[in-house]
Image: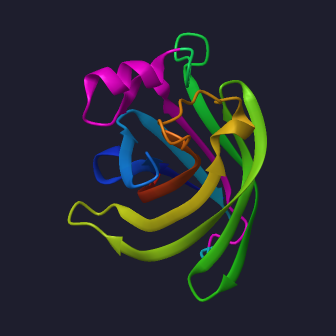
Amino acid sequence: MATFKIDAAHSEITFKVKHLMITTVTGSFSKFDATAETGNPDFSDASISFEADVDSITTNNEQRDAHLKSADFFHAEQFPKITFHSTSLQKTDGSSYILKGNLTIFGITKPVSLNVEHTGSVVDPWGQNKEGFEVEGKIKRSEFGIKWNALTEAGGAVVSDDVRLIMNVQMIKQA
């Protein structure tokens, strides 16, 4: 069984949400951790766990970040972590997979399905075995109890319910 840990310096955990339904705001987490354990070189039997510190959220706007950390959204004080634990990783073809698991946000756990692309393997100049992955998916924030919203004068939503998840991940094989 091989264990891989995320290389946080070479990974990005981001999300995208429509604002006023005309533009997209991108956010990210700067503090996160992930582990994958696998017995197969193609990762087809991998067990994956992930967590992000809610307090590390950034959208490049301090006021918005503070609002996202408040009880209106993530309630970072009461629910400091977002977690994911895989239930299956199914290879669909070549380097593509469907990753299924349980995502917990705001204290609510729901099953999610994510698309994964294994983007390559390499031994870096320091002799570390590294694996690259791109992970994408979509969730509805309301399903996780994050229901805050406001309406424009025309009655449109200020913040979309749909949230796109986009993660570029580099994993390091542990000795």
* Residue most extreme to the front: 154
Q: Residue at 57% of width from left, 30% of height from top?
A: 149
Q: In this view, does 108 lie to the left or right of 3?
A: right
Q: Residue at 35% of width from left, 26% of height from top?
A: 64
Closer to us: 141 or 104: 141
Instruction: Tell me residue 56's x, y (percent).
Output: 38, 27
Relative to 171, does residue 90 appear above or below in the rendering? below
Q: Residue at 40% of width from left, 55% of height from top?
A: 22
Q: Is 91 colored magenta in this rendering? A: no
* Residue most extreme to the top: 77
Q: In which quarter of the image is residue 127?
A: bottom left
Q: Is residue 166 left or right of residue 48?
A: left
Figure colour scheme: rainbow
* Residue most extreme to the left: 125
Q: Is 44 colored magenta in this rendering? A: yes
Q: Is residue 62 visible?
A: yes
Instruction: Tell me residue 31's x, y (percent).
Output: 39, 32
Q: Residue at 63% of width from left, 36% of height from top?
A: 83
Relative to 173, does residue 51 appear above or below in the rendering? above
Q: Can residue 7 be seen in this view?
A: no
Closer to us: 144 or 148: 148
Quadrant showing the N terminus: bottom right
Instruction: Tell me residue 42's x, y (percent).
Output: 61, 76
Instruction: Tell me residue 109's x, y (percent).
Output: 77, 35
Q: Quadrant of residue 94?
A: bottom right
Span of residues in magenta: 43-70
